[in-house]
Image (cartoon, helix red, strand yellow):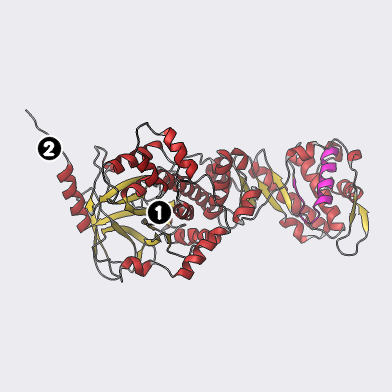
Amino acid sequence: MSSLNRELSTDSAFAAGRNSWNRHYHNSVVQPLLTDLYQITMAYAYWKSGKIDDHAVFDLFFRTNPFQGEFTIFAGLEECLKFLDSFHYSETDIEYLKHALPQGIEDEFFEYLSQLTAKDVTLYAIEEGSVAFPRVPLIKVAGPLIIVQLLETTLLTLVNYASLMATNAARYRMVAGKHIHLLEFGLRRAQGPDGGLSASKYSYIGGFDGTSNVLAGKLFNIPVKGTHAHAYITSFTGIDELKTRVLQHKEDGTTRDLLELAMEHRAAIASVLDVSTDESSEGELAAMVSFAIAFPDGFMALVDTYDVKRSGLLNFCAVALGLNDQGYRAIGIRIDSGDLAYLSCLARETFERIAERFKLPWFSKLTIVASNDINEDTILSLNEQGHKIDCFGIGTHLVTCQRQPALGCVYKMVEINNQPRIKLSQDVGKVTMPGSKNVFRLYGADGHALIDLLQRVDENPPEVGQKVLCRHPFQESKRAYVIPTQVEPLYRVYWAEGRVAQVLPSLEEVRERVQASLRTLRQDHKRTLNPTPYKVAVSDNLYNFIHELWLQNAPIGELS
C-alpha cells in the first residue's frame, strides 16, 4: 500500500469530515472564476501546447513573518478544501469566458474546462491552527498542471488573509494575557461584508472570545456579545420620556418602579462617590433604566456619553443597585473614550466602595470593558500603566491588520513531470527550494520546538535521539547538528482521489490547537520586542540539491 493510500481516511471518516463543514458557511463567491485572468490564459496555452497530462507540484508559502514577529498561524485550510470539493465551471461560467477571453480560442478548450474538477489533485498541508514559519510550505499541491495552476489565486486569497488575521488575533491574545476577555468589534470597519465575516471567524480561531457580528455567530457558532451605542443614551433627553418604569422581582414577582429605586440610590451614593446628582445627566439615567428593564439579567451600560466620573458611573451604579433590589445583578460597564487606564481604575474603585457600603461583594467584581481604537501598543501601554480592565472590544486595528495589511503568501512550481524546478533571483530571499519536500518539526530537550527541517521526499525521516545535520538553505557556514527528543511530521494528506482525506476539526478544536501550538515555542520567539527568529533548515541532501540545481540553471556571464 502506498504512503498516500495509508494516509487516506475511510469513507466514514470522509463523510464525517465533509459533514463537519456542512454546518458552517460556504461562501458562494469562492468559485473557479475567483481568479486572475492570466491563470485561465495560461491554462489555454498549456492546453494548446499539449500539456494536459503534465504533472506538477506547487508549494504555497510565505517569506517573512508578519507584524515584525517570528511566527505565523496557518489558517484557511478548511475553505481551501471546500473550494476543491466544489471546483467546477458552470455553463454560465463557460459562456462568460467565451466573451472575456481573446477571440480565436477553440470550443474544445471550453469543453475541456467544463469537465474539469479537482479529482486528480492531491493536497498536503500542515494542520490548520499550527504555528508556521517562512519558507516552510503551508500547502503542497500536486496534480495535472492545468488544474493546479488554476487553483493558485483562489488558494492564496483563502490562506493569506485567514492566516494574517489569526496571527494578529493570537498576538493580541498574548499581550492581553489569558485572563482578559477579547471581543472582536470590527464588522463596520472591515474591508467589506466577506472581510467582516472572515475577521470574525479567524479572530476567534486566533484566541478572541467572541464577536459583535451576529451573522458570524450564526454561521460559525461564535459567541456574540455587545452592549449598546451612544445613540441609545442620547435618544433620551429626560426621565419624563420613560414609558415603562416598572420591573418585576426576579424571585417573588413583586413590582417596583425602577426609576424611583435608581433615583433613591443615586441620591444616597453621590456623596460616597464624591459627586453631585446635579451634574449627572437625567437623559442618561432614563436611558440606563430603560435598558435595564429590557435586559435586567444582562445590564451592561456605556458610561462615557457625557462624563464618566460625574454622570456615567453614578447613573450606572444607581440603576445596578435598583436591579439588585429586584433580584438581578448587573453585568458591568463599557468605556469607549478617554484615559482608559485612569477611568478603569476609577470605575473599579467606585464598584469597591459600593460593594463595601451595601455589603454586596459581587459589585466589586463588575466587568469593565474598554474599546476605542485599541491596538497591540495600546494594550502594552495599559499594562505598563496599570489598569482594571476585564475585557477589550477591538475593531479597526484588529480586522484591518493595522501593522501589516498582507501576509504575502506565494504559490511556486517546484516540480514538473518529476523534474525539479527552481526560480532564481538576485534577491536570495526569492530563490525557491526545488522539488517535492517533506517537513519535520524537531523538539529539544526542554520540550520546545527547536527547528523545522525540510527534506526531499525520498529521504528517510529524522529519528529521535539520532544526530541530524541541519543547514541554512543558502549560507554554507550556517549549520548545526540536532539530536531531537521528538520528531513531528508536519504534512498530512487532506485531499486526494476527489475527496477530503481527513476528519476535519471543528472551529473550537482549531482554536485550541492555536494555543497548544504556541505553547511549543520558547517565550523569546513570541515576545513583542525583538523576538528571536525560529530556525528553518534543510537537510544536507536538500542543501546540495538546491545548489546543484542553482548552478545548472544560472547563466554564466562572460567578461571581455
In front of the other: label 1 or label 2?
1
The answer to whether 394 appears left or right of 76 in the picture is right
Q: Which amino acid lies under the numbered mark 1 shown in the image of this protein?
A: Ala
Q: Residue furthest top?
A: 560
> Circle 2 — which element?
loop
Depth check: give the residue in front, 496 or 164.
496
* The disc label shown at residue 118, or none: 1
Quadrant placement of the N terminus: bottom left
Q: CA distance from mark 1 to mark 2?
A: 41 Å
Quadrant placement of the C terminus: top left
Q: Neighbour class for label 2 at 10 Å: few (<14), some, many (≥20)? A: few
**Which of the 4 image quadrants contains residue 309?**
top right
Depth check: give the residue in front, 403 or 426.
426
Q: Residue furthest left?
A: 560
Which sits earlier in the primary sequence, circle 1 or circle 2?
1
Please say whether residue 287 is one of the residues in the magenta stretch: yes
Say if residue 507 shows up in the picture: no
Depth check: give the residue in front, 3 or 516.
3
Query: Is 505 above or below relative to 63?
Result: below
> Circle 1 — which element?
loop
Depth check: give the residue in front, 406 or 66.
406
Q: Position of residue 396 (x, y in %)?
A: 58, 40
Q: Position of residue 191 (x, y in %)?
A: 55, 38
Q: Neighbour class for label 1 at 10 Å: few (<14), some, many (≥20)? A: many
Q: Position of residue 320 (x, y in %)?
A: 81, 52
Q: Position of residue 294 (x, y in %)?
A: 82, 50
Please provide the residue range marked out in magenta: 280-301
Q: Which amino acid lies under the numbered mark 2 shown in the image of this protein?
A: Ile
**To which residue does mark 2 refer?**
556
